[in-house]
Amino acid sequence: MTKIESIRSEFVEYIPDDLEDGVLYISIPYATAVHKCASGCGETVVTPLKPTDWSLIWNRDEISLYPSIGNWSLPCKSHYWIEKNEIIWARKWSDAEIKRGRRKDSKRKKHYYKNTKKHNEI
Ligand SMILES: [Zn+2]
C-alpha cells in the first residue's frame, strides 16, 4: 500500500463510480465529499459536509477538511488530516480513544439537533 501525500479537489455534481487516488471529490448539491482512503487501501471514505460532520475550508486552490479523518471502521484504521491539499498523518487511536471519540460525537449531534428543533419550534 502506498500512502498518499497530497490530494487535489475536484468539484462535481455526482460522485463518480471510479475514484482516483489523491482526489477529493466535492459535491456541493449533495453536501458530501468523497475520496479514496489516503492509506492506499482502496477503500472509499465519505465525509458528509454538515455542521455535525465535516467542514470544508476552501481557499483558492487549497482545500482543508475539519476535523481529522479517522477511518476506524476500515481495516487500515488510518487517521489523518487534509490540510491545504496535504495529507497530514496523525497517530492511530487506541480502542478506548475511539470509543471516547464516538461518545463525544453522538453527544455533540444530540445537542445540535436539540437546539435545531428548539429553534424550529419558535
Ligand atoms: Zn485505508
Image: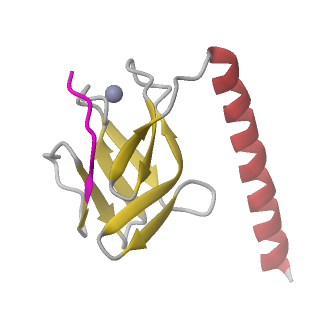
In the rendered image, the quadrant that contains the N terminus is top left
Residue 43, percent from left and from top: 28, 31
In the rendered view, does 28 fall on the left or right side of 18? right
Seen from the viewer's position, the closer of residues 111 and 100 is 100
Is residue 6 inside the magenta stretch?
yes
**Residue sitting at x 72%, y 42%:** 106
**Residue sitting at x 31%, y 36%:** 38
Residue 17, percent from left and from top: 16, 48
On the rendering, which quadrant does ligand 1 occupy? top left
The residue segment tinted magenta is 1-8
Residue 76, percent from left and from top: 38, 20
88 is higher (above) or lower (below) than 98: below
Seen from the viewer's position, the closer of residues 35 and 48 is 35
User: How many dots with numbers?
Assistant: 0
In the rendered view, does 14 fall on the left or right side of 59? left
In the rendered view, does 75 fall on the left or right side of 107? left
**Residue sitting at x 40%, y 74%:** 59
Residue 119, image quadrant = bottom right
Characterize the magenta stretch by its predominant secondary structure. Answer: loop
In the rendered view, does 14 fall on the left or right side of 120? left
